[in-house]
Image: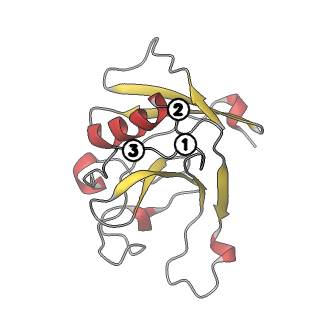
Amino acid sequence: MTLGPRPEASLPPGTARVLIQTLRGDITVELDTARAPATAANFLRYVDAAYYDGARFHRTVRASHQNGVAVPIGVIQAGLNSTRVPKGFPPIALERTSMTGLRHLDGAISMARDGPDKATSGFFICIGDQPSLDYGGQRNPDGQGRACQRRTPHAADRH
């Protein structure tokens, strides 16, 4: 996968756009820099440093494949190119969906995390609505949810 150029023409204020190029088609992501500025800036610093270039979507998680999981989800997960290990990017504080108003709806992009203030480089795209990933949702034992962003589907994104 390659993430790049960010065409900014005709975007609403408080929005940044990233193009994710994959062998299966392009995905255009819109980041809400106004409502979730730390999450957007975190994602963009990895994009700008080219740490996602050559990476891939490494796992598809579907509810039907999660036998025994109390709160199954549907997501496509991605992370860094393993040959490009970043240095100096500390984890960010969690911007809870209760504060941002953003939700884990179909196509939303979100940062993975290892704890409430531990989001780094991993991200995923929601397959269908995933309210259990929002603040107060049951997927995370702490109920804090995940930091969410937006995704804009275009014709090239359709499966």
Task: Look at 50% across and 51% down and name the residue there.
Answer: 123
The outermost residue toward the bottom is 68
Question: Which of the two marks, 2 or 3, is nearer to us in this view?
Answer: 3
Image quadrant in which you'd find residue 22: top right
Quadrant in the rendering for residue 96: bottom left
Tell me: residue 93, above or below residue 63: above
Tag 1 or tag 2, which sits nearer the N-term?
2
Residue visible at 66% across and 60% down?
59
Residue 129, placed above or below residue 4: below
The reply to whether discs 2 and 1 touch (Cβ–Cβ < 8 Å) is yes
Callout 1 crowding tier (Cα within 10 Å): few <14, some 14–19, many ≥20: some
Query: If the image is split into quadrants, where does the C terminus sit?
Result: top right
Q: Position of residue 99 (x, y in %)?
A: 22, 51
Helix, strand or loop under label 1? loop
For disc 2, the marked residue is: 50
Q: At 35% from the left edge and 52% from the top edge, which residue is drawn?
A: 147
Specify the label residue 84 is tagged with. Answer: 1
Amino acid on which the number 2 mark rests in the picture: Ala
Left or right placement of residue 43 versus residue 1 in this view: left
Instruction: Give coordinates of residue 69: x percent, y percent.
Output: 55, 83
Residue 127 seen in this snapshot: no
Residue at position x 41%, y 43% from top? 149
Q: Earlier in the sequence, mark 2 or mark 3?
A: 2
Q: Which residue is mark 3?
A: 87
* Rendered location of residue 113, percent (x, y): 39, 61
- In this view, the residue in front, 85 or 64, is 85
Give the Cα distance between marks 1 and 3: 9 Å
Secondary structure under tag 3 reads loop
Q: How is the image coloured?
A: secondary structure
Q: Which-is-in-front pick, marks 2 and 1?
A: 1
Q: Are marks 2 and 3 in contact (CB under 8 Å)?
A: no
Tell me if mark 2 has few (under 14), some (14-19) or many (20+) residues whose alpha carbon lies within 10 angstroms of its own.
some
